[in-house]
């Protein structure tokens, strides 16, 4: 049976093995979808590709119907950060950056991953935005050991991003993952070292740096879901599942 510590579920080794399977499957779905991202494709096309791949792999979407969300994946473009609803009228263009966020359920456990995909030629500034956001994981992994705290992860993200001239989004957070898509603990992308819950072997975290070229402030559009930067500046989003283990951190997902 899992151990519950202050409402944070500590996974057994066998449960982590299932979460590894979930992470591998959701990574496969993302990589399939990513291969179709190009100018002229609609975000609904991407959802259809994801749906076929989920069916092939025998898993279901974690997002469809979650708190009423109407899509199987999230597709957010340029100044849209997260929770974009796939739409047959939303056509991807050259120079766009497309945030693809995918969740699946497998054997009672969840998998969750996100990546920002450039379309054709993008500016050097936007390339750097993507590079810095993705590179956050090189810094994060250094503090994903038992004994560190959630605040160490949060502060590491914030310090690295701000040192490089960008802003971290403050309204949305990473999270634990397991039998529930969004479990405790919450993992903000900003904070203070030495604060928050202590990391314990057996925790599985979905850590997701969200970074903007301008303000960290955001708004929700009229569809009730899509999150957009308040100043309409470009933003990026990446997400990995990371297990805290006695052998050190293990990144379960792959881009």
Image: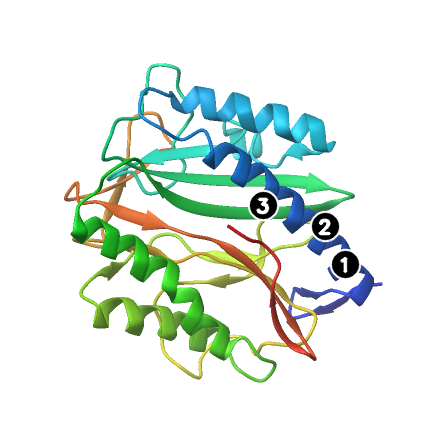
Which of disc 3 and disc 1 is earlier in sequence? 1
Task: Say which residue label 2 marks.
Answer: 21
Q: CA distance from mark 3 to mark 2?
A: 10 Å
The N terminus sits in image quarter = bottom right
Pinpoint residue 96: horizontal percent, then vertical percent. 26, 35
Q: Residues within 10 Å of mark 2 (few under 14, many from 20)?
A: some
Residue at the image position 35 percent from the left and 35 percent from the top? 76
Pinpoint residue 8: horizontal percent, then vertical percent. 64, 65
Which of disc 2 and disc 3 is earlier in sequence? 2
Residue at the image position 59 percent from the left and 25 percent from the top? 51
Residue at the image position 18 percent from the left and 65 percent from the top? 165
Does residue 44 appear to the left or right of 61 in the view shown?
A: left
The quarter holding residue 92 reads top left
Task: Say which residue label 3 marks.
Answer: 27
**Camera sees residue 70:** no
Q: CA distance from mark 1 to mark 3?
A: 15 Å
The quarter holding residue 190 reads bottom left
């Amino acid at each position: 049976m899992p151990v519950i510590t202050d409402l944070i579920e500590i996974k057994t080794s066998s449960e982590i093995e299932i979460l590894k399977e979930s992470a591998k499957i959701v990574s496969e779905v993302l990589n399939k979808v990513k291969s179709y991202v190009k100018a002229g494709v609609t975000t609904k096309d991407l959802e259809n590709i994801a749906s076929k791949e989920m069916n092939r792999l025998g898993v279901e979407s974690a997002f469809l119907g979650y708190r009423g969300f109407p899509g199987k994946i999230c597709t957010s473009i340029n100044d849209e950060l997260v929770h974009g609803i796939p739409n047959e009228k939303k056509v991807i263009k050259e120079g766009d950056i497309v945030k693809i966020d995918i969740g699946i359920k497998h054997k009672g456990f969840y998998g969750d991953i996100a990546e920002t995909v450039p379309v054709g030629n993008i500016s050097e500034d936007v390339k750097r935005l993507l590079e810095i956001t993705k590179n956050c994981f090189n810094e994060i992994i250094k503090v994903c050991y038992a004994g560190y705290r959630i605040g160490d992860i949060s502060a590491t993200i914030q310090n690295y991003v701000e040192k490089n001239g960008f802003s971290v989004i403050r309204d949305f957070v990473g999270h634990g993952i397991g039998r529930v898509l969004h479990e405790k603990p919450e993992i903000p992308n900003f904070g203070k070292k030495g604060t928050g819950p202590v990391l314990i072997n057996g925790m599985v975290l979905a850590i997701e740096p969200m970074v903007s070229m301008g303000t960290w402030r955001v708004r929700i559009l009229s569809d009730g879901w899509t999150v957009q930067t308040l100043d309409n500046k470009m933003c990026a989003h990446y997400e990995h599942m990371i297990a805290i283990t006695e052998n050190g951190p293990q990144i379960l997902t792959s881009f």
